[in-house]
């Protein structure tokens, strides 16, 4: 495998692309963003309270179907807070997929707990319910009314499935396992607002869920996050913890360690405008994915993330798998070739059991995540991707396949 540093175009997904470059995924601000942000500035409601924060929370809760929503400064803060309110304590363990962006594993560590990495399944690349079952049944035991990891002796407290790339996890077996083993389910839905599992909204499938409105997501507030849940006590606690755990705001009494995790009214104003466009943005993402599939389906050695029969995917990041043997070259080589043509592409994340940052955490039979990391490459799929640019990407991939 080649050095990827030279191949990747050096700007973050979600940030503005230099002229002439086709970026991976950038924001599309074509609605009421200006109007609502201007309202904040005109009214002086610019900080972490205000009518747009309330409106944004209501919009997301209503959309997902949960009773409550609490806006946060980003998705990572939402995850950290969700773990705390769900009762994850220092030295507990939380089952996290090996193939995901690192934020959920980091959030587990912020709570003083340990991630245990579970493999992805090969069909839809999400947390593997079978390996999760095997881990819970074979590697854990009940001791004094608590589920403990046989290897580490630690209490297993929660499952944190991540709906990666806009596609939902197979949630029924995950929730069944959680009920059987008395575990909390914290959905990391940060990449998948708008996706559905068996006609139910992602974010309303477990006990509590988190979204991100980071710049590369389907909708963005620049940076932002949201916790959603039906549990009123947890929502109240989340609101309390994210506002510095203020017990008496006049006398500055704080009974707990809190966090400055609230979203500003300006960001929420953008969020409201973006929510108004969510359905259209998801439809566009799906259209872009369908167009790629149509144009590349006959490409030898290419595979796509298919949509499960029970899934409605937002197709957040259109990603292909490149079979090295059949293509006689690998995903990083294609990335390099695209980069030479000013097209930004990205591999999926280093599997977390290989991350030096999480070297001390346990991984359970992780294999598929390694294969996906080797073979996967995400292609440009911003909501604003114009047909001509997509055709340029398609041609570049097809040319590479026939080189
Ligand atoms: C799976 C996953 N979890 C959590 C996050 C964290 O969200 P944020 O960047 O808003 O902190 C992201 C991405 O940004 C993500 O992709």
Image (tube, grey):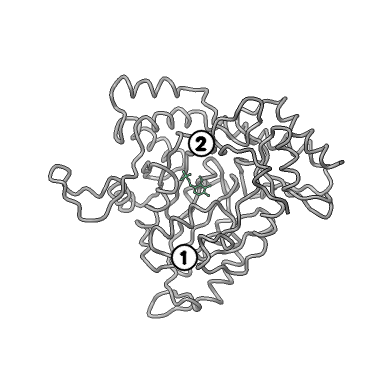
Q: CA distance from mark 1 to mark 2?
A: 35 Å
Q: Is residue 16 left or right of residue 290?
A: left
Secondary element type, mark 1: helix
In the rendered view, would you say 168 is above or below 399?
below
Crowd rating for badge 2 (residues with CA inside 10 Å; few <14, some 14–19, many 20+)? many
- The quadrant of the image that shows the C terminus is top right
Determine the residue positioned at 81% across, 38% down. Answer: 398
Q: Is mark 1 within 8 Å of ligand 1?
A: no
In the rendered view, would you say 32 is above or below 235?
above
Residue 334 location (% of width, % of height): 75, 43
State the residue lying farthest toward the right.
402
Secondary element type, mark 2: loop
Residue 89 location, quadrant:
bottom left
Residue 52 location, quadrant:
top left
In the rendered view, would you say 87 is above or below 392?
below
Residue 133 location (% of width, % of height): 57, 69
- The quadrant of the image that shows the N terminus is bottom right
Q: Nearer the viewer, residue 389 or 2?
A: 2
Q: Nearer the viewer, residue 138 or 17?
A: 17
Of labels 1 and 2, earlier in sequence is 1
Q: Nearer the viewer, mark 1 or mark 2?
A: 2
In the rendered view, would you say 118 is above or below 309?
below
Residue 362 location (% of width, % of height): 53, 69
Determine the residue positioned at 60% across, 28% down. Answer: 18
Crowd rating for badge 1 (residues with CA inside 10 Å; few <14, some 14–19, many 20+)? few
Determine the residue positioned at 43% across, 32% down. Answer: 271
- Judging by the rendered image, the residue that carries numbered circle 1 is 179
């Amino acid at each position: 495998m080649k050095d990827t540093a030279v191949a990747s175009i050096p700007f973050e997904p979600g940030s503005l692309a230099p002229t002439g470059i086709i970026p991976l995924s950038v924001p599309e601000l074509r609605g009421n963003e200006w109007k609502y942000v201007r309202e904040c500035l005109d009214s002086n409601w610019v900080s972490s309270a205000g009518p747009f924060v309330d409106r944004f929370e209501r919009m997301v809760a209503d959309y997902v179907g949960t009773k409550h929503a609490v806006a946060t400064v980003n998705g990572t803060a939402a995850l950290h807070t969700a773990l705390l309110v769900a009762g994850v304590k220092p030295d507990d363990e939380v089952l996290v997929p090996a193939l995901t962006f690192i934020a959920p594993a980091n959030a587990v560590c912020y709570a003083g707990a340990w991630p245990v990495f579970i493999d992805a399944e090969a069909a839809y690349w999400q947390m593997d319910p079978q390996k999760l079952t095997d881990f819970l049944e074979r590697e854990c035991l009940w001791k004094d009314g608590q589920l403990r990891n046989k290897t580490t002796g630690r209490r297993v407290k929660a499952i944190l499935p991540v709906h990666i790339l806009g596609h939902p996890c197979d949630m029924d077996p995950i929730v069944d396992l959680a009920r059987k083993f008395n575990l909390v389910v914290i959905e990391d839905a940060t990449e998948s607002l708008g996706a559905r599992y068996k006609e139910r909204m992602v974010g309303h499938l477990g006990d509590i869920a988190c979204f991100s409105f980071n710049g590369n997501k389907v909708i963005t507030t620049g940076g932002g996050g949201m916790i959603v849940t039906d549990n009123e006590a947890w929502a109240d606690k989340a609101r309390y913890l994210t506002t510095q755990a203020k017990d008496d705001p006049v006398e500055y009494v704080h009974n707990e360690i809190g966090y400055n995790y609230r979203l500003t009214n300006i960001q929420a104003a953008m969020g409201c405008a973006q929510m108004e466009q969510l359905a259209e943005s998801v439809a566009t993402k799906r259209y872009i994915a369908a167009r790629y599939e149509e144009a590349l389906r006959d490409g030898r050695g290419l595979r796509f993330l298919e949509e499960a029969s029970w899934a409605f995917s937002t197709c957040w990041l259109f990603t292909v798998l490149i079979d090295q043997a059949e293509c006689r070259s690998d995903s990083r080589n294609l990335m390099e070739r695209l980069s030479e043509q000013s097209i930004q592409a990205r591999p999926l994340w280093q599997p977390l059991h290989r991350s030096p940052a999480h070297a001390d955490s346990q991984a359970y039979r992780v294999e598929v995540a390694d294969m996906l990391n080797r073979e996967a490459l995400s292609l440009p799929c911003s909501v604003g991707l114009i047909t001509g640019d997509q055709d340029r990407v398609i041609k570049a991939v097809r040319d590479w396949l026939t080189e």
